[in-house]
Image (tube, rainbow, N blue to C red):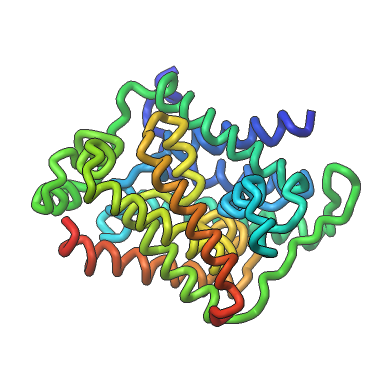
């Protein structure tokens, strides 16, 4: 059981994600998680006020089922396949984060400084982050699954442009905005 | 039956993202600081398997489970939408430390503040839908 309970190495995780993508293709679908934000908007009735959401979301219900499964998988992994899993991040990363006030670095799966106490600042940060993720994924037509995994696996150059964008945004957030925010 | 299969694939996905730590804020921060090979190895091995599998599917003109020819849709060719949209997503990805899949995986794991992220991601998606005709694509 230890092999399941220990952290799974990247060379197990990466290929498994690719196999999930291949299985979805075999089932006649495509691997793209952020489409679910659009699906949920449609389920909630956004199609009445905006034509972008006026489509038959029931044809995408397989993706919503995948989403439900992902939540169940997260629950099972955290509660039954882990004994307080703490990612073994680099010593340099821990030093950098502690200097920014992240004392949970190296002691937790998630930073309690951002996801622990729900003060005004954290709520605002989570809201802004969510807004960017929702707006950006739909604008770019996909997220890490649709572009970095599915698109690049199909050698689609627009997906490479998207992934370059992901990194420009991510590097800017971590190196330009983090020192201001934290 | 097919429905159960999608749920099962989602369960496996959720477990993989959590256990291989692609859903950890710390791993994403570490990646954007180039301080570990972990996430690059994760995405890299996914791509090695993915590229080989997709190319084989195309060469062999494989059929899907229902006997239909597998057709993988090409992305529209342009730069602005992918670059600008990608930058917005990247800013959010690094701040939240999770992309859309892991946001729901972590909610399932009990990280309830992800509900705020999801609510605003839905709002962001809606705003894109409303203003999409005014944006460069």
Q: Nearer the viewer, residue A124 or B81?
A: A124
Query: Measured along the vertical axis of the image, is residue B95 above or below residue A68?
Result: below
Image position, residue B53 (x, y; %): 68, 53
Q: Spot the residue most to the front.
A: A49
Q: Position of residue A166 (x, y in %)?
A: 43, 66
Which quadrant would residue B21 be assigned to in this image?
top left
In this view, which residue lies farthest toward the right? B67
* Quadrant where the N terminus of chain A is found in the figure: top left
Whether B128 is drawn above or below A83: the answer is below
- Give x and y (percent) for residue A172: 29, 69
Residue at x-position 55% and y-position 36%: A70
Closest to the observer, A32 or A35: A35
Describe residue B122's horizontal placement relative to residue B40 as left or right: right
Q: Closer to the camera, B89 or A77?
A: B89
Q: Residue at x 22, y 69 (%)?
A: A176
Query: Quarter holding the C terminus of chain A?
Result: bottom left
- Is residue B64 among the parts visible in the rendering? yes
Q: Residue at x 77, y 44 (%)?
A: A27
Q: Position of residue B107 (x, y in %)?
A: 44, 35
Q: Is residue B48 visible?
A: no
Is A13 left or right of A36, judged from the image as shown? left
Along the line of sight, which residue is nearer the eye, A156 or B6?
A: B6
Q: How many marks?
A: 0
Name of the residue lying farthest toward the left: A99
Q: Is residue B133 left or right of residue B70?
A: left
The residue drawn where x is 25% and y is 47% is A122
């Amino acid at each position: 059981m230890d092999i399941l309970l220990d952290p799974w190495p990247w060379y197990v995780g990466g290929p498994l994600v690719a196999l999930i993508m291949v299985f979805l293709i075999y089932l006649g679908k495509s691997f793209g998680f952020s489409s679910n934000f659009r699906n949920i908007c449609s389920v909630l009735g956004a199609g009445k006020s905006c034509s972008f959401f006026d489509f038959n979301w029931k044809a995408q219900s397989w993706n919503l089922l995948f989403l439900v499964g992902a939540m169940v998988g997260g629950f099972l992994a955290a509660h039954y396949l882990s004994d307080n899993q703490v990612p073994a991040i680099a010593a340099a990363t821990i030093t950098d984060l502690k200097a920014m006030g992240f004392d949970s670095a190296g002691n937790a799966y998630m930073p309690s400084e951002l996801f622990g106490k729900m003060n005004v600042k954290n709520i605002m940060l989570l809201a802004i982050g969510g807004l960017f993720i929702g707006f950006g994924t739909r604008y770019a037509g996909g997220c890490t699954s649709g572009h970095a995994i599915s698109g690049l696996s199909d050698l689609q150059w627009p997906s490479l442009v998207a992934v370059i964008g992901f990194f420009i945004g991510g590097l800017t957030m971590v190196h330009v905005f983090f020192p201001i925010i934290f | 039956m097919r429905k159960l299969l999608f749920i099962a694939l989602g369960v496996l996905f959720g477990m993989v993202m959590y256990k291989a730590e692609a859903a950890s804020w710390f791993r994403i921060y570490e990646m954007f600081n180039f301080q570990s090979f972990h996430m690059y190895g994760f995405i890299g091995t996914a791509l090695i398997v993915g590229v080989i599998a997709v190319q084989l599917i195309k060469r062999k003109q494989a059929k899907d489970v229902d006997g239909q020819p597998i057709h993988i849709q090409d992305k529209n060719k342009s730069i602005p939408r992918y670059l600008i949209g990608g930058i917005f997503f990247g800013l959010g990805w690094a701040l939240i430390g999770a992309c859309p899949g892991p946001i729901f995986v972590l909610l399932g794991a009990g990280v309830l503040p992800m509900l705020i992220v999801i609510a605003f991601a839905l709002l962001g998606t809606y705003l894109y839908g409303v203003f999409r005709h005014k944006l460069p694509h």
